Amino acid sequence: MTVLALATGTDPSVLSGVSGWAVHLMETLGVAGAGIAIAVENVFPPLPSELILPLAGFTASQGTFGLVEAIVWTTAGSVVGAMVLYLLGALVGRTRTRALMARIPLVSIADIDRAEAFFTRHGHAAVFFGRMVPVFRSLISIPAGVERMPVLVFLALTAAGSAVWNTIFVCAGYLLGENWDAVERYAGIAQWVVVAVVVALVGGFVISRLRSRSRAATP
């Protein structure tokens, strides 16, 4: 049984899901496989970095590759994946994005203007800290592309924020050893907290907007 199979506590032939896919990449390509897995995770946010990163750390603890190598390659993968979404946002462009957002019920042009003004003022912090927030880690790259944040600035902020996030999770997997999967369980709780906060904010916005329209329509 290989080191990576030990990480999942099962035989390699029956590995499945994201764990099995990440294991296969790292068994086949070594540390580069971890970087590729994180690059794909950044483009497809439903894939959990909270699972892949600790698994890479556990693998490093077994001597398959080095801890620093794991952090460097996963951070490079984060930057590559983020750049894909940045280019997507730049391709769609500001004009089309505004037109699409204006079609969303209850969203006004003034709301869009405020969102753009916020990103203009706080875009650098949003990209850096956004790399450390579940769910938004990948999505923050799109408005950066739409607003055409300078590419070098975007890459530097993304690399810095991703390095912090990746180091925490890779080192956690490295230190926990065969208990690396505990990281994903606790990170999953944090992810649901973020989702709950977003749902609450969206719900508050919708209720507020409906009340405003109701008062405006009252003679």
Image (cartoon, helix red, strand yellow):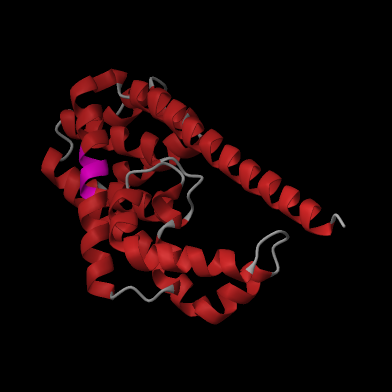
Residue 69, horizontal then vertical, whole percent: 14, 46
Residue 127, horizontal then vertical, whole percent: 32, 57
Looking at the image, which residue is at 19% across and 32% down? 171
Residue 13, horizontal then vertical, whole percent: 46, 31
Front residue of 166/96: it is: 96
Front residue of 34/193: it is: 193
| Quarter of the picture holding the C terminus | bottom right
| Quarter of the picture holding the N terminus | top left
Residue 215, horizontal then vertical, whole percent: 78, 52
Compared with residue 169, is residue 177 higher up or lower down, i.e. above or below?
A: above
Q: Which residues are magenta?
A: 163-167
Compared with residue 114, is residue 149 higher up or lower down, i.e. above or below?
A: below
Q: Quadrant of residue 61?
A: top left
Compared with residue 6, is residue 200 higher up or lower down, i.e. above or below?
A: below
**Is residue 61 something one can see in this rendering?**
yes
Looking at the image, which residue is at 62% across and 67% down? 101
* Dominant SS type (magenta): helix
Q: Quadrant of residue 213?
A: bottom right
